[in-house]
Image: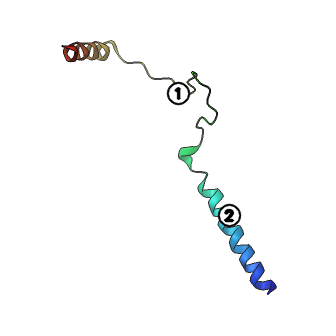
Amino acid sequence: MIRSFARLLTLAMLGGTLLVAAGCKEAEQNRVLFHEPGVYKGQKDQGISDETYQELRQRARRQAG
């Protein structure tokens, strides 16, 4: 009886360890966990070149009609 309890406890602890390890995905590291309304805490956008900016403006003008 005690051996089966010990075996069950060992399996439960192993399962818990696997669940905790699965929650540590690399993709989920360093992400924002606390949000403030109106405050962006993400990485800053990279700037675009003047040439790309002008192409986007021209495209927007053509789409506007």
Q: Position of residue 32 (x, y in %)?
A: 60, 34
Q: Position of residue 8 (x, y in %)?
A: 72, 77
Q: Which residue is mark 2?
A: 16
Residue 51 has which mark?
none
Could you tell whether 20 is left or right of 40 in the image?
right
Give the residue type that dot 1 points to.
Gln
The image quadrant of residue 53 is: top left
The residue drawn where x is 62% and y is 37% is 33
Of badges 2 and 1, the one in the foreground is 2
Above or below for 18 versus 53:
below
The residue drawn where x is 57% and y is 21% is 38
The image quadrant of residue 62 is: top left
Pointers 2 and 1 in contact (C-beta within 8 Å): no
Could you tell me which quadrant the C terminus lies in?
A: top left
Give whichever of 20, 34 is nearer the camera.
34
The residue drawn where x is 77% and y is 79% is 6
